[in-house]
Amino acid sequence: MTTANAIVLIVEDEPEIAELIEFHAERAGMRPRIIHSGKLALELIRREKPDVIVLDLMLPDLDGLAVCRKLKQSEETRSIPILMVTAKGEESDIVAGIELGADDYVTKPFSPRVLMARISNVLRRTNAANEPSPTTDRMILLGGKLVIDLDRHTVTVDGVKAELTLTEFGILHYLAGRPGFVRTRDQIISSVHGKNTVLSSRTVDVHVTALRRKLDTLADCVETVRGVGYRFTDSSQSDDV
Ligand code: CA
């Protein structure tokens, strides 16, 4: 699914904001639709399966997090990407939304340009994630500078082997599995939990610091998303704004 012709469902009770998003989505060649209520949004989404949902978290009837939870619980709607719109300072809502399965977020007030970039990122990444992944035991990233060998549990940085602990390896492997997606600390903890250690939120940060040091010149690929968590990012190719 590319940006052009994508059906964008805007779930937002404030008409000015909904219309602003609609205007820019239309201009980008998408097909926007507006709905002002969480409950009605659920019905419409089940019926019409939009390509992407721009979901305000503060809605009068059923709030955005509840909408997100219901969509991700249902087999038919689970794979539709969700971009949350939150108020500034609502990090706990962002964390909750991402753990429920939302794909990304913007905070109000947002620039239309940023919002449109996020929508096309989410569409593109969803498209890439749905393609069958080649059966390989190696992940080659950052233009070949970073290689993760899943069989041998080794990582090379610019051709040089980095000595990662199992936990560091687990964190890197998990984040690199979906570049561009924000992961919360709790998601990271569950992904490596039981492999060799018990982690807490704080120790995740300690492991990430150590991981970055070992990634050396590539340290920036593990990006901190303030108040939310971490994401793997390729800054040389990033079109995030
Ligand atoms: Ca609202």
Image (cartoon, rainbow, N blue to C red):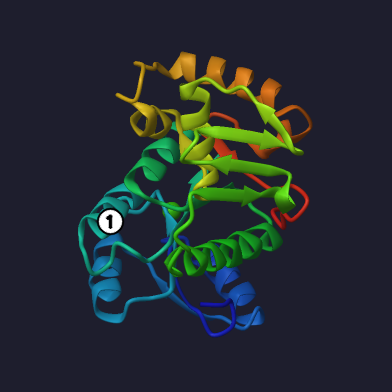
SS under mark 1: helix
**Residue 114 quadrant:** bottom right
Q: Amino acid at mark 1?
A: Lys
Where is residue 79? Give x, y as percent: 34, 64
Structural crowding at the residue carrying mark 1, measured as other residues with C-alpha within 10 Å and reported as few (<14), some (14–19) or many (≥20):
some
Q: Nearer the viewer, residue 80 or 169?
A: 169
What residue is shown at x 59% (from left), y 82% (from top)? 4
What residue is shown at x 27% (from left), y 56% (from top)? 72
Classify mark 1 as within 8 Å of ligand 1 or not, answering yes or no: no
Q: Is residue 231 above or below residue 80?
A: above
Q: Is residue 110 above or below residue 202?
A: below
Where is residue 21? Give x, y as percent: 57, 68
What residue is shown at x 65% (from left), y 78% (from top)? 28
Q: Is residue 109 visible?
A: no
Left or right for 76, reference 145: left
Q: Nearer the viewer, residue 33 or 137?
A: 137
Where is residue 149? Give x, y as percent: 54, 41
Q: Is residue 23 above or below residue 153?
A: below
Q: Which residue is mark 1?
A: 72
What residue is shown at x 33% (from left), y 76% (from top)? 49
Where is residue 12? Give x, y as percent: 43, 62
Q: How many marks?
A: 1
Q: Is residue 189 visible?
A: yes
Q: Is residue 225 above or below residue 34?
A: above
Left or right for 51, reference 24: left
